[in-house]
Image (spheres, rainbow, N blue to C red):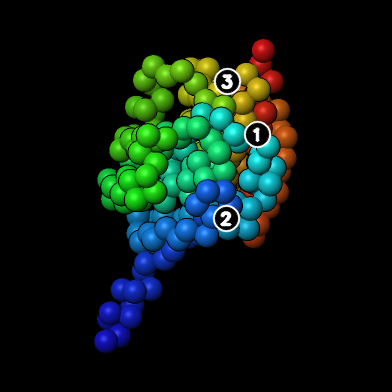
Amino acid sequence: MRKNNRLNHLERKLRIISGRWRGRKISFELKNELRPTKEIVRETLFNWIDSYLPGARCLDLFCGTGALGLEALSRGARYCDFVDNSSSCARALALCLNNLNADNLSEVHYSDISDFLSLPNEGYDLVFIDPPFNTGLLNESCRALSDKNLVLPGGMVYVEFSSSSAPTYIPSDWKKYREKQSGSVKYRLYLNSKD
């Protein structure tokens, strides 16, 4: 009996805060160091960008549960690419999107992030970057996005990182727009000022 209770504690749910899927709960398993963005952080972020979302083309890198991209789609984004190198996360998210009838609004890519970013792409209005902490992947992702011009002029980039490991590379065209901290997690929003 205890073993079953312990297994049940490994499954969690996150709630979509607002929009067409408001209140829907998405199940996920605590494995592969999965660290979904806290609800309080998501609420702050989406208050910052709410008026920017309608019609936006989004990219959710290191998507895990897909919490950020799902919230964006729920609030009116027109499309989201979800990218993660965990096959179990990609499968679970694809099923979730199918259950929400959102297959035509999104694509889930089971891929290494650098491989995905090296492919031809038309660019994004909004990019979420929430990699595993203390790995250097945030800097690599920012550099690749900038080198390939994947953030459209006037586009926004959200980054989440440990308060002990701030990014050391941010493209010069990305201007810090907002910043906040929740416990040991810092998060920032940048605006691409490139013309």
Q: Which mark is residue 17?
A: 2
Q: Is residue 134 visible?
A: no
10 Å crowding of disc 3: few (<14), some (14-19), many (20+): many
Q: Residue at x 68, y 46 (%)?
A: 47
- Element type at marker 1? helix
Specify which label sits upstream in the sequence, 3 or 1.
1
- Residue at 33 percent of width and 46 percent of height: 98
Q: Residue at x 57, y 43 (%)?
A: 75
Q: Identify the amino acid type marked 1.
A: Tyr
Residue 151 appears in the figure:
yes
Q: Position of residue 25 (x, y in %)?
A: 45, 60
Closest to the observer, 123 or 20: 20
Calculate the distance from the C-alpha at mark 2 to the C-alpha at mark 3: 27 Å
Q: Residues within 10 Å of mark 2 (few under 14, many from 20)?
A: many
Question: Counting other residues with Cα less than 10 Å from the Cα at mark 1, is it few (<14), some (14-19), or many (20 or more)?
Answer: some
**Above or below, comparing residue 99 to residue 189 in the picture:** below
| Res 195 quadrant in image | top right
For badge 2, the amino acid type reads Ile
Q: Using the image, tell me which numbered label, if any, was put on residue 152.
A: 3
* Disc 2 and disc 3 in contact, CB within 8 angstroms: no
Amino acid type, label 3: Leu
Q: Nearer the viewer, mark 3 or mark 1?
A: 1
Most extreme residue toward the top is 195
Asked if residue 4 lies left or right of residue 30, the reply is: left
Residue where numbered disc 1 is placed: 52
